[in-house]
Image (cartoon, rainbow, N blue to C red):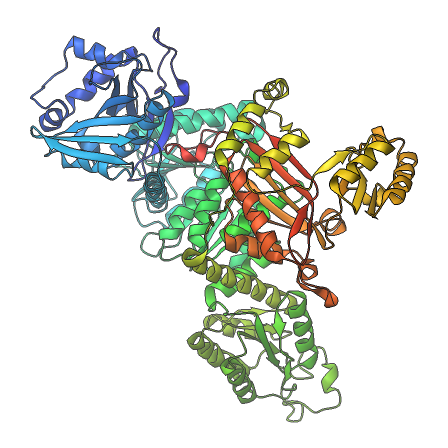
Amino acid sequence: MDDTAPATDEQSYPQHWEADVLLRDGGTARIRPITEADAERLVEFYEQVSDQSKYFRFFAPYPRLSDKDVRRFTHHDYINRVGLAVVVRDRFIATVRYDRIDADGRPSSTGTDAEVAFLVQDAHQGRGVASALLEHIAAVAQERGIRRFIAEVLPENRKMVKVFTDAGYTQRRSFADGVVHLEFDLEPTAASLAVMRAREHRAEARSVQRLLTPRSVAVLGVSRSAQSVGRALLRDLAAAFRGPVYAVNRNAEPGTLLDGVATYRSVLDIPGPVDLAVVAVPQSAVPAAVAQCGAHGVQGLVVVSAGFAETGPEGRDRQRTLVRQARAAGMRVIGPNAFGLINTDPERPLNASLAPVLPERGPFGVFCQSGAIGVALLEAAHRRGLGVSSFASVGNRADVSGNDMLQYWEEDAATEVVLLYLESFGNPRKFTRIARRLAAAKPVVVLKGARHTGSLPPGHAVQPAASRLRDATVDALFQQAGVVRVDTITELFDTGELLATQPLPAGDRVAVVGNSDSLGLLTYDACLSAGLRPRSPVDLTTGATGENFRVALHTALRDPAVDAVIAVAIPPIGVQGAAPDPASQGRPERGEEAGQEPLEDDPEIALALLDAAGLGRDLGKPLLVTQLALSGLTGRLKAGRVPAYPAPERAVHALADAVGYAQWRRRSAEAEETARVPELEGVDETGARVLVEAALTTREAVAARLQAGGARVTLPDAEAVSLLARYGIRVSPVLSAPDEDSALRAAATLGYPVALKATAEHLRHRPDLGSVRLDLTGEPGLRRAFRELDALLGGADKARLVVQRLAPRGVDTVIGAAVDPAVGTILSFGLAGAPAELLGDVAHRLVPATDRDVAELIREVRAAPLLFGWRGAAPVDTGALEELLLRVSRLVDDLPEVASVDLEPVVVAPRGLAVLGARVRIAPLPVRTDLGPRAMSTL
C-alpha cells in the first residue's frame, strides 16, 4: 500500500504539501495533492458519495463523472488550479479544489481570489475531514499568492456552511438566487488559530483515548516459549483485560490455545474486530504485521519490537516507513521500542506493557521516554503505595508523544497530577502551549534527563533546533508554562504525592510542630534554604500524646499567619531503631516507665495527624509529615491521603514545589485579568522593518544565508543604534578615538565628564583587564588615560578606543533577547559582571513579555536586592528598566528577522537609565511551523 502520489509531467509535484493529520474521532489520514495518476481513485471515491452530497457539490443531479470531469479534477498546475485529497488505506475519502479567478470571476493566473469546493464521502462526514482540508488548502493558496476564498453553498448544505463559518477566518456572507455566497480572507487570525488548536486538542485527546480503551486486543509475535516477550505480554494482558484477547503466531495450527487464548496465524484470520494490536515480532516482520493490521481495520499499535531509529540511520528510515504505513491505514503508534501502555480504569483495565502486574488505581498520569525509567517509576509508585490512572512508556516516540498524552490527561477526570520523565522535546513550542493550559487546572511535574549534557537518546527524533536546547531555555519554558521541575525520581513522587493529596498553600508561611526539637530545627533550616518563611518550631517533647499533637496542629492550622504545616514525629526514647533526641536526654518517656514493648508507630499520633489533615483540607492548608523510625506511621497516614517523608529535606522540598506552583497558578489567573502588553510611544515599526530588510540584502547577509543553517549577521554599530532608536531605545553615543587628539575632540563634542574605553572584541565588556577609564573631567585627565590605555593595550587602533559621555551612577545590568528556533525568542535580564557571567544569575521569559512578566523578571535574579536599595543605597528606577525590557520584547516580536539584541551595560540610576553598549544580529526570517495547518510530525 502506497499513498504517496507518483511524480507527474505537470508543474513540479509539491511534496511538501503532503501531511498526516488526526481527525476528530482520533483516526489518522493523509492529505496530499491530487495527480493525474489518481483517476481510478477519484472515480471509485465518487461512486461512494450519495446523490444528495453530489447535488450539494454541483447544484444539480450528477450521478457520475465524465471522462472530461475526471481529467479536469486530476490535472492541476499546482498554482492556479490545485486539488487535494484525504487518503485512508490508499482510498480517497474527501477532496477539495480551488481555481484562481479575477475580479470578474473568470479564470486567472494573476488574481488573488479563488473559488473553493469540497466533497466528503457520507461515511466520513462528521469526522472533521472538511475542516482539516480547509486548513491545508488555505495554506496552499496563501503560498501561491491567493488571499481570499469564495464559496457558493446551497442553504440546505448546513454542514458545509458550518465548516466555513466555524473556521475563524474574517469572512463576509450574503444570500442571492437561492445560494449562500461566502468570502473569507486566508490570513490566519487569533480566532482561526484558536479554532485550529481546539480541534487539535480534541483530536489528539480522542486518539489517545482510543488507544487506552480498546474493545479488543491482539498480541502479535506470541511464541510457544513461555519465557518469550510475546508470551509475557499475552499473559499480563489477558490477566486484566475484560474484552476479547487474541494471539497471533504465524506457525500456529488451527484451534491452538496459548495461555488459554485463541491463537491465529495472521491478524486477518481473527474473526472479530481488533481495536489495538501489540506488536512483538522481529523487526524484519514488522512491516508485514502492520500491513495486516491496517487491512483488518486495527485502530492503534503498541510496537514493542526494537531495531529501529535507536540502531542508526537505516533504522531511522525503517521507523519513518513504519509510521507512514500505520498512519496511511488510520492507525496511531506507541513506539517502536516501547515499554507499553497501561490503563487502570476498573471498567476497562488494560496492561499492554512489559509490566508484570497492573498497577493500583490512583491519581497520577505517568509518561516516560525510557523503558528502564518506566520500570523504575512503576516500581517506585508500587513501593510507596501510590496508584496511576494511566501510564505510557513510548520508546522512540515516533508517533504518540508526551504532547498527545497531555492533551488526553487534560480531559481525563481520573488524572489529578501528571508526572513526566522527558529526555527530549519533539515540539517544544507545542509542549509549552499545552502544558501551560493543563497546568492551570492540574499540576504537571517533570523530571528532565540529559540536563547538563544535552545529548539525545538513540532513536529520538526531534527538530534540529530542539536538540540544542540550553538548560536555561528549558527552565524558562517550564517556568512560564507552570511546570514543576524536579531532579530525581524520588522528588518526582515526593512532590506529586503532596500535590495529589493536599490543598495548594496560599503562601509560603510554614508552621513546624512535633515531638522533637532537633528534627524541628532541621525542618526549620530546610525551609529557610528552600526560600520558605518558617515560624520557630513548636516542640511538644518526645512525651507528647496524640491529644497534644491534635491541639497543637489545630492551633497552627487555624492561625491566619500560617499557610502550611509540617508535623515532625519520632518514637519515644527507647523505641527500636530510634535515635535519642538530644533535647530530651534524661527525661523518662511514655512506655519506658510502663515497661511497654518497643513500637513501630503510634496510633494516637496517627489519628491526631489524620484529624488535623481533615481540618487542613477544610481550611485550604496542606499538612505533611516528616518522621523518623516510625515505619508504621506512613501506612496509617496513606489511607487518609496524608503524605509522610522519612527526611525533613524531602518534605520541605515537596512543599516548596507546591508553594511555587500555587504562586504560579495565582499569578497566571491574575495575569489573565490584568497583565497586558502595553502600547509604547515612539515606536516606528515600519521604519525599523525597512532598515532590517535593507540590511538583509547586503553582500555579507546574502553570503551568510548560503551557509549551513543560515548564519547571523552583526549590524554595524551605527545601524544597530538606528534600529534601536526606532523602538525608543536610545544608546549613549560613542566617538572613535584612534589618537589622542581625536579623543580630545570627541570629549569636547560630547561634553565632560567622559569615559574612555576599549571596544575591540577581546576587550569588550572586560573592565577587569583595565580597559576602561571613568570620571575623566577634563583634558589633562583624558590625555593621561589615553596614554595609559594606549601603552597597556598595545595601541589605540588595536584596542579600538572610544569616548563616551559618563553615565549617571547606578547599577550595571545586562538585557538580551535571542531567538531559539525551537521555542521562540527569549528575553533575558541579569546584573552585569560576575553575577551573570560567573554565577549564571540570569532570568528569562518568552516573548512577547507582558508588564507583569518584566516586573517579575527583574525581581527574579538573586542579586535583585541591589536594585531596591540594598544596605541603604538609593533604589534605582525600576520603572524605566521595565519599560526598556518591554521595548526590547516588542522589537524582537515585531521583527522576527532580528536574531538577537544585547544591551550591555545598561546603567540604571535612581532616575532614568543609560544604555552604554548595544549589539544587534539579524538573520533571514525563520520558518514558523506552529502557525500552519494541523499536521502530525514527520521526523
Quarter of image, res 56: top left
Q: Residue at x 20, y 27 (%)?
A: 151
Q: Position of residue 871 (x, y in %)?
A: 74, 67
- What residue is drawn where x is 83% and y is 48%? 777
- Judge by depth and name the residue closer to the eye, 303 or 885: 885
Q: Residue at x 47, y 70 (%)?
A: 641
Horizontal placement of 515 versus 331: left or right? Answer: right
Nearest to the observer: residue 829 or residue 907: 907
Q: Residue furthest front?
A: 748
Q: Residue furthest bottom?
A: 593
Q: Is residue 344 visible?
A: yes
Which part of the image, by quadrant, shows the N terminus?
top left
- Residue 804: x and y in percent read 75, 41
807 sits to left or right of 482: right
Q: Quadrant of residue 27?
A: top left
Q: How many marks?
A: 0
Q: Residue furthest top?
A: 9
Rendered location of residue 66, percent (x, y): 14, 11
Left or right of residue 480, residue 579 in this image: right
Most foreground residue, 700 or 483: 700
Q: Is residue 236 visible?
A: no
Residue drawn where x is 45% and y is 79% of the image: 615
Residue 791 image position (x, y, % from top left): 92, 35
